């Protein structure tokens, strides 16, 4: 069917592309200590993108019986589409990346139920008043890209994931903690134990509450790997998004090759890491994947580009196109990998007379993200006094600018942890974060 659709479109338009996906997922979820649901989801569909008289036509469907309508629909839409700044790419060499585990589709529902129940029971042994949620599952997917320039490629991917959350209500105080991990490969007891220990650590650190100290930026703040992702990742990546670069809204538009943060900071978009959830041999336009240095030793490398934004900037695609079935491609990250440093996380805490640890935010995204700003309430954070965690902070807000904060790095953790399966980061101790705290 894909071949006949491409042939029909190629005969009618200057250029054509067919994008087809199929997926099967099997989630199991627990809520408030009990099994909530067992499901199976199947998704399939096809998208047609064409270039006709220099304009882009796009349409898609999940109804196989209506695929024959796509050519006429694309013809009707193309005159109103965006101006194309690219041509569809020709075939090329693609890297090999290990993102399929044949054991994943053989994971039984009962095994996932037993795993979820076991994790919850181990938490309840220590905290019997907890309300625990868990979500486990596996999925398989296949993507195929074909175009009139000769590309006809596909790849398969498997995924396996587990997340564990706990809620503790004490009077008017509500504590929520969670941890999660995902991979293209099956994982076992070691990874599950790390999830459990992460949740346990958060619960233990939260037994007491503490008053955060309001500060204008000279109090050290330690971001855990999850804290890095929750606070700094989105405002940082917005500056590297090719759309923002092309329309002139990125603060990095003229700063490629310049030092923008501390020289110890290196951030890569790397879809070639075996087992990572976002890894892939080529992007959603058929451009070969490669490791891209967004920041290397503090210096801005280059933006994330798909075909359209690359054409607008007079550059080549970096293989960063992502898309949903119902949307045209746009630049996006695949697997963010932040280089580690040389300081133990525990030593960061032990070395501070006073400080703040940030793990989770509530309402992230406030402020001018395009300019690198962040501003949000701390939903999970801890106060440090005399080298020890003394309790969880409440009614605390942090704000700052990611470029300013990453230029005031004091320490980087000596190991990187996965935040689910698409980001790997060390802990970071920084200055430059403003802290606002409500008086008790």
Image (cartoon, grey):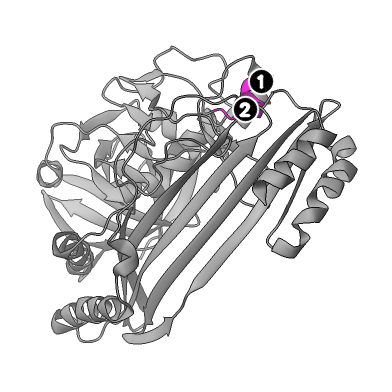
**Residue 132: percent from the left, percent from the top?**
31, 79
**Res. 55 in view:** yes
Q: Residue at x 63, y 31 (%)?
A: 243
Numbered disc 2: secondary structure: helix
Q: Which residue is mark 1?
A: 311
Towards the viewer: 224 or 159: 159
- Relative to 109, does residue 429 appear above or below in the rendering? above
Is 72 positioned to the left or the right of 138 in the image?
right
**Main structural element of the magenta stretch: helix, strand or loop?**
helix
- In the picture, the disc for residue 307 is 2
Place residue 163 in its image quadrant. Answer: bottom left
**Residue 164: percent from the left, percent from the top?**
30, 69
**Res. 249 in view:** no
Q: Is residue 380 magenta?
A: no
Q: Which residues are magenta?
A: 305-310
Mark 2 touches mark 1? (CB < 8 Å): yes
Numbered disc 1: secondary structure: helix
**Residue 270: percent from the left, percent from the top?**
37, 33
Place residue 125 in its image quadrant. Answer: bottom left
Can you say which quadrant of the picture contains the C terminus? bottom left
- In the picture, the disc for residue 156 is none
Is 408 positioned to the left or the right of 238 in the image?
left
- Relative to 395, does residue 124 appear above or below in the rendering? below
Q: How many marks?
A: 2
Q: Is residue 308 magenta?
A: yes
**Residue 222: percent from the left, percent from the top?**
26, 44
* Distance from the alpha carbon under mark 2 to that under mark 1: 6 Å
Towards the viewer: 4 or 106: 4
Q: Residue at x 67, y 44 (%)?
A: 3
């Amino acid at each position: 069917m894909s071949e006949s659709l491409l042939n029909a479109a190629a005969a009618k338009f200057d250029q054509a592309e067919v994008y087809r996906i199929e997926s099967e997922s099997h989630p199991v979820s627990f809520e408030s200590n009990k099994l909530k649901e067992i499901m199976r989801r199947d998704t399939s569909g096809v998208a047609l993108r064409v270039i006709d008289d220099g304009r882009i036509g796009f349409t898609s469907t999940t109804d196989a019986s209506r695929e024959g309508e796509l050519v006429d629909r694309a013809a009707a839409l193309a005159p109103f589409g965006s101006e194309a700044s690219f041509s569809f790419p020709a075939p090329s060499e693609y890297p090999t990346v290990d993102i399929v585990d044949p054991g994943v589709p053989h994971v039984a529902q009962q095994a996932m139920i037993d795993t979820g129940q076991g994790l919850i029971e181990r938490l309840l042994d220590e905290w019997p008043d907890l309300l625990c949620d868990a979500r486990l599952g596996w999925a398989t997917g296949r993507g195929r890209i074909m175009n009139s320039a000769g590309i006809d490629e596909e790849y398969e991917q498997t995924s396996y994931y587990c997340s564990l959350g706990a809620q503790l209500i004490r009077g008017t105080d509500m504590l929520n903690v969670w941890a999660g991990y995902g991979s293209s490969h099956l994982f076992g007891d070691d990874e599950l134990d790390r999830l459990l220990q992460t949740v346990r650590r958060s619960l233990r650190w939260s037994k007491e509450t503490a008053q955060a100290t309001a500060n204008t930026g000279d109090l050290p703040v330690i971001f855990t790997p999850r804290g890095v992702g929750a606070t700094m990742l989105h405002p940082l990546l917005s500056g590297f998004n090719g759309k923002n670069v092309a329309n002139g809204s990125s603060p990095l538009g003229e700063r490629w090759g310049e030092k923008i943060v501390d020289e110890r900071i290196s951030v890569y978009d790397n879809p070639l890491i075996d087992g990572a959830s976002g890894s892939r041999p080529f992007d959603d336009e058929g451009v070969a994947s490669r490791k891209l240095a967004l920041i290397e030793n503090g210096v801005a490398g280059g933006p994330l580009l798909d075909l359209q934004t690359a054409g607008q900037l007079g550059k080549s695609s970096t293989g960063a196109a992502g898309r949903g079935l119902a949307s045209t491609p746009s630049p996006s990250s695949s697997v963010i990998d932040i280089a580690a440093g040389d300081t133990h996380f525990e030593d960061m805490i032990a070395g501070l007379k006073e400080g703040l640890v940030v793990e989770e935010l509530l309402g992230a995204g406030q402020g001018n993200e395009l300019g690198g700003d962040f501003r949000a309430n701390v939903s999970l954070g801890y106060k440090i006094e005399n080298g020890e965690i003394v309790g969880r902070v409440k009614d605390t807000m942090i704000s700052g600018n990611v470029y300013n904060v990453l230029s005031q790095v004091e320490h980087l953790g000596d190991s990187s942890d996965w935040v689910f399966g698409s980001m790997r980061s060390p802990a970071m101790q920084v200055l430059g974060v403003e802290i606002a705290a409500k008086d008790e």
